[in-house]
Amino acid sequence: MIIATANVVLTVINAGSGVAAARLLGPGGRGELAAAQAVGGLVAMFATLGIGEGLVYAVARRHDSASRSLPAAAIFIYFGCAIVVPFGWFVIPLLGLDGPSQSAARAYSLVAFVFLLGLPGLVLRGLGNARGWTVFRLIGPIAWLGAIMLGPLLGHSSLRIVVTFLTLQVPVLVAYWAFMFRKGKIRRPSVRRDGVPMVRFGFPLLLSSLPALLSLRLDQLVLATQVSTTQLGIYAAAAAWSTLAVPLASAVGNALFPALAAAREPEQQSFLAPVMRRTILLSVVLCAGSAVLAPIGLRLIFGSPFASAGRVAVVLCAGALFLCISAVAGEALRGLNRTRSVLTGEITGCILGIGALALLLPRWNLIGAAWASCIGYSATAFVLLRALAAHQGQPVAYFFVPTSSDAQAIVAGARQFAARKLKRS
């Protein structure tokens, strides 16, 4: 419940950031920020070497390894950042971004170092400390919202917004590291014993994260070099609206990963399939609702300059359903230590998404990019479900098709939640 509530809060904060960026910066400024996040975020993700997921898995399997696994992960990521980020700064100008977008993308790639400072939050996730992990998850979105709100004072510069975003996080994260040192919660690691297993677990996930991020950001990455920042800003608003249902699935996946990693095989089988089916059922309802409300919601919330994003958002809402499925199935496979299956699914979706984008974007512009994303998302979801079904020895429908008992469980859960809230009030 804590994770689900945190995801709702994060959704509200991220939605507020998107609305604030649209209102304060207009489509052009929103497009510059989208380009910075898409390109700079890709560099930052690759610099982390996939160690974050390996850290969560290592701590979930053995809680007593946390004090050694944390510094080992930090060492590997530091060297990854020191090599990959400078290389990214060299590559970014070759992508054809305009001057402001290029500078902002370079600055945003430095978020890899902020990720390094935020590693204690992943330790808390592996330990099952939902409250502590939630605090760390809120730092970045709150800092992003704060940087955007300061945009008018910064001269509506996307570069200054990104720099402010990075600056706001560093003191908080450094202070927590200092606290951990004082409490003796960090011990000298063994690179071979503590670091190498995390790399073995995490590197396939890094390889899967690369096509995953490409699939998720591929449309915006290509649009950043093919259309104006105004059109990119409109598309980014549509994409933000379409993912309103994703945080629910992400909350379930976030809880599944460490739970499955810590559980034995009989326990894994007992709760995995019902959780999958019920999450998918809720995702269908939420995505359908988002699609119906998209044309009106975008105009009311983002403003009339973004009214043309309605049709794009409707298409992307269909793709968001497959994002929800992938969010749960992918985390489940990580918890089952089936990282190569995740890699296969993400590569499949990325390849099909790239092919669809090449065919559809020249003909239908933003709508074509939206349909290409749907094709890539659906391919990934299908492959992940197949891999999960094969591992558990069940048909795909066992994890995908809801039953009447699943609907009854959702209704009963909603009633219990409402009853608790009324009792507290």
Image: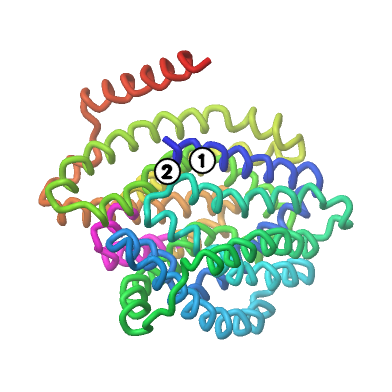
> Disc 1 or 2, which lies upstream in sequence?
1
Quarter occupied by residue 353:
bottom left
Which residue is tagged 1? 6
Decide: is 48 above or below 363. Answer: below
Task: Find out whether residue 13 is within the magenta segment.
Answer: no
**Residue displayed at 37% across by 82% down:** 190
Front residue (pair 174, 37): 174
- Name the side, left or right, on which 336 lies relative to 26: left
- Name the side, left or right, on which 290 lies relative to 325: right
**Residue displayed at 35% across by 56% down:** 380
Magenta segment range? 330-353
The picture places residue 347, in percent across and down from the top left corner, at 36, 66
Tag 1–tag 2 contact (CB < 8 Å): yes
The picture places residue 33, in percent across and down from the top left corner, at 70, 58
* Residue 41 seen by the camera: no
Decide: is 229 above or below 401. Answer: below
The picture places residue 244, in percent across and down from the top left corner, at 53, 38
